[in-house]
Amino acid sequence: MTRSVFEKLIALLGLVFMAFFAVVVVPPLIESGDIVGAFAAGFVNPYSSGYSFDAIVTGFILIAWVLYERHVFAIRHGWVAIVLCFVPGVATAFAYYLVLRLRRENARRLDNRDETI
């Protein structure tokens, strides 16, 4: 798979989750207005609790990664991924951050190639 296809696939999957969230989660949340209840609904049984906790921990791991790379590699705009972890979710945040890193890495690779020519 080429880098371009990979980047487009990751971006598409992030957008698919965002659309799913907008269609499935947002309308009942607007109707009820109960954010705490919506969060608690992710823990109604052991199976949903496992999936919910997995997503929460994955979000915190992604946040730690973003903050680390901001400090070590000066990656800008990673804060957007942190916001996306909370709304619509980790899937979109992770996709955004991967695409951000890919584009930064590609730009850096092109800059290094220009220096060697």
Image (tube, rainbow, N blue to C red):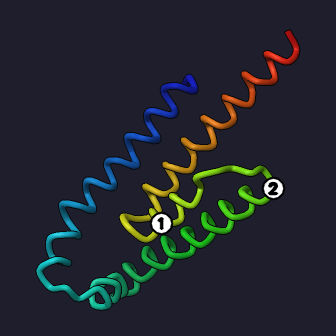
Tell me whether the residue at label 2 lies in contact with that at label 1, contact meaning CB atoms closer than 8 angstroms: no
- From the viewer's perspective, is 111 left or right of 37? right
Question: Which residue does the image show at 57% across and 61% down from the upper left?
Answer: 79
- Tag 2 secondary structure: helix
Residue at the spot of label 1? 83
Q: Is residue 5 above or below residue 117?
A: below
Q: Report the quarter where the N terminus lies.
A: top right
Q: Residue furthest left?
A: 31
- Identify which residue is drawn at 57% across, 27% down: 3
27 left or right, relative to 1: left
Image quarter of the C terminus:
top right
Say which of 12 and 33 sits in front: 33
Kindly give the residue lying farthest to the right in the view shown: 116
The answer to whether 68 appears left or right of 26 in the picture is right
Residue 82 image offset from top left, x and y in percent: 53, 65
**Residue 36 locus on image (x, y percent):** 32, 90
Measure the C-alpha gap from mark 2 to mark 1.
20 Å
**How far from the left and from the top, in percent, is residue 76?**
64, 51
Q: Position of residue 68 (x, y in %)?
A: 74, 62
Q: Residues within 10 Å of mark 2 (few under 14, many from 20)?
A: few
Q: Amino acid at mark 1?
A: Val
Residue at the disc numbered 2: 72
Mark 2 or 1, nearer chain start: 2
Is disc 1 surrounded by few (<14), some (14 to 19) or many (20+) residues within 10 Å? some
Instruction: Report whether 22 appears left or right of 65.
Output: left
